[in-house]
Amino acid sequence: MNTRPNRGWIQWALLALLVLGVALGVTRALQKRSAQNAAANAAAQALQQAPDYQLGPQDVVLVLALALDQTAAVSGSLRALQTAVIKARAAGELQGLTKREGDAVRAGETVAQIDNTEAQARLRQAEQQAQAAQAQAAIAQRGFDNNQALVRQGFISSTALDTSNANLAAAQATHQAALAARDIAHKALGDTVLKSPLSGQVSARLVQNGERVGLDARVLEVVDLSAFELEAALAPANAVAVRVGQVARLRVEGLAEPVAATVARINPSVQPGSRSVLIYLRVVATPGMRQGLFAQGAVVIGRVEAPAVPLSSVRNDKPEPYLQLVREGKIVHLPITLAQQAQQGGETMVMLDGVAGAPPGTAVLRAQAGLIREGTAVSLAGANATGAPAAPATSN
């Protein structure tokens, strides 16, 4: 039996199957590569096309037309309008000092005294000298009266009368000098008593009982907490608009509520070193207020009406601050210059005075919306026909 033709047919069949397999492999590889290219092109197009962001009402705020107070910032330490330092007006041993820090004192109340033994002795000496001088003046007066009668009767000459007159004048002068010395001694005795010149509280006790103090030694410091004042330094440009009588609101450390203040005085001269102008604000006394507490706030110097946005919506991740606006369904970055700030409904607002492109009603992204690339398409949830978010409802 001849098998050679069968073998040839088998070889051709195997060759055909091999060619068919290679063709199928090549076809599949080309199809896979085409699918990868299509996916890559689709991904590239998706990257080039900005995503469409969906913004909620909590992400957007409208530019509002507000009438805001123009203010000048002030800060400083509170000081009592009336304070006094009680000093020793005589040298000696201090006695009777019972007041300590925080104790109340009244105006004219005796708070201590200096040992007055020597002062009392000097006063008694001066009183005795005044009495002796008065007696001498009385003797001289009687001698003058007698000589004057004798001259009229012609028993003595007028020269003797002149001598009596001179003696009387000398005795009277000595008496007046003795009275003045007595007054001085009486004042020196009074200077040993230390009295408070005002009503208030003791803020410092500087000496103790039994210490020997010198003249003008500081003994007590008294503070009147019924009225306070704040000294604040302003730049000349800000001080130009400040007037006596303008009101201010201050935050005082330790106090929960702000306190009212009024511009009481303005220093007519600038400070040599800082070139600043000092203004003095009269602060309404509030329970818990103490001398030396730090206070800061602002003086209302005017009122202006301008578009404004919350300060939290201003972004600072570029060299200049800017806002993220929604304009024609896309994000626009608008550079701004920070202007006057004010409080509105518990939120700090910043004016957009002189900024074009952000009229009232423009949608601005809040801080929680995050950074969105300029030109990105966005849609606003609850937007009206103009594309702006619906205004929030307000309660009366």
Image: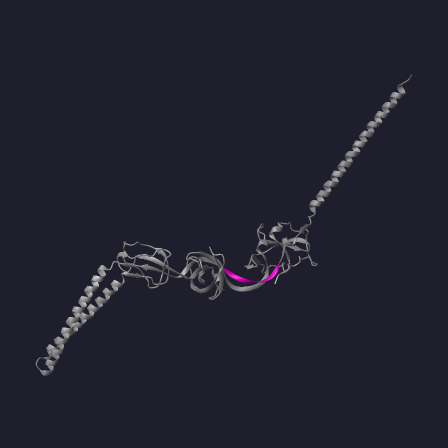
**Residue depicted at x 15% and y 73%:** 138
Is any atom of residue 170 visible in this view?
no
One can see residue 176 in this view: yes
Q: Nearer the viewer, residue 359 or 342?
A: 342
- On screen, residue 158 versus residue 286, left or right, reads left
Residue displayed at 77% across by 35% down: 30
What span is in magenta?
A: 63-72
Quadrant of the image containing the N terminus? top right
Tell me: 75 left or right of 173: right
User: With respect to residue 171, does 360 lie above or below?
Assistant: above
176 or 219, which is in the foreground? 219
Residue nearer the viewer, 192 or 341: 192
The picture places residue 114, in percent across and down from the top left corner, at: 27, 58
Residue 380 found in image quarter: bottom right
Q: Position of residue 305 (x, y in %)?
A: 58, 63
| Residue 38 location, quadrant | top right
Q: Residue at x 79, y 32 (%)?
A: 26
Quarter of the C terminus within the rendering: bottom right
